[in-house]
Amino acid sequence: MLMDAKDSIYSPTQDDLIFPQEPTFSSSAEERRYRKEHLAAACRIFARHGFSFGFGGHLTVRDPEHPELFWTNPMCVPWSRTKTSQLILVDHAGTVIEGKYAVNRAGYVLHSAIHAENPDIIGSCHAHTVNGDAWAAMGKPLDYVTQDACMFYGSHTVVRDGAGKVPVANDSGNPIAHAFNDHKAIIHQNHGLLTASRHSIDDAVWTFIALDHCCKMQLLMDATESRPIEIDPEFAEYSHRHLGNSFISWLHFQTMLYEINEQEPDYLD
């Protein structure tokens, strides 16, 4: 006699289902390793998204034990080949505390200002992308005309100070650093995109990818003759709360990390 379907099919409990969980750490060393590995993975992910532009662009994550220091990608090592062991530890003065590689001067200026001005920021990203740079040249914020753009509702702004100037002076990053007091994403006029997170490098990376994605959509929409329909502010704010929070961004990053772990495990070296 055939078994009844309800008796033959295993029905898992919610606790049995695989769902990413944010980690907890037993030591600073354990958390440091986690942050460095995710930073190296982030470099590989940026390369996959076509964000590489010579040695331009930089990603940083604060050290969990020494918060006055941050880890960043090594100078002139392509993102597509960056490994955890190659990351360098830098202080706010631009001195390499640990590592064999030099620091990108522009990266140090921008990110040291961001981390110094905002001691609660853990990770930050900047890259010279086609879509981001093109939209930044307009000097305008995103329009809230897509659900994805609502991720940035009330949490991104345009910085016009220092527009187009190569940031190599010690005060170059300050307007951007100030802007991160109240925002998670910056469109720097005539320069490009920057993101930061008080949660994780994972969050900052996905926020950057989503921001570049929205810039591309904005450019495509602006190239049409029709005017996109704006989303009601109430709905935009609702979508922001549900799509733009740090945990959702962290989850998006885990999807990309899964692929990197499967296909490029040497980033862990």
Image (tube, helix red, strand yellow):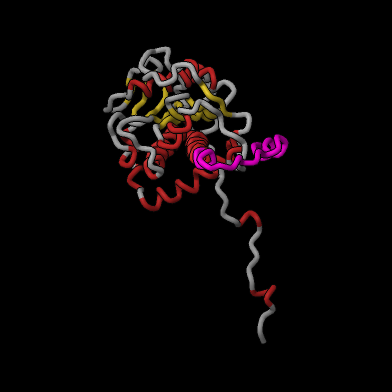
Q: Nearer the viewer, residue 33 or 155?
A: 155
Q: Position of residue 248 (x, y in %)?
A: 58, 41
Q: Nearer the viewer, residue 248 or 236?
A: 236
| Quarter of image, res 4 | bottom right
Instruction: Point out the stretch of residues depicted in magenta.
Output: 219-243
Residue that appears at 37% across and 14% down:
93
Residue 43 shown left or right of residue 218 in the figure: left
Image height of 214 relative to 172, above or below: below
Q: Nearer the viewer, residue 45 or 149?
A: 149
Residue 23 shown left or right of residue 63 in the figure: right
Please indicate, yes or no, whether residue 256 appears anywhere in the rendered image: yes
Magenta-drawn stretch, dominant element (helix, strand or loop): helix
Residue that appears at 65% across and 65% down:
11
Q: Position of residue 201 (x, y in %)?
A: 48, 34
Residue that appears at 45% across and 28% down:
137
Please indicate, yes or no, whether residue 23 appears anywhere in the rendered image: no
Residue that appears at 55% across and 32% down:
199
Q: Position of residue 123 (x, y in %)?
A: 48, 30
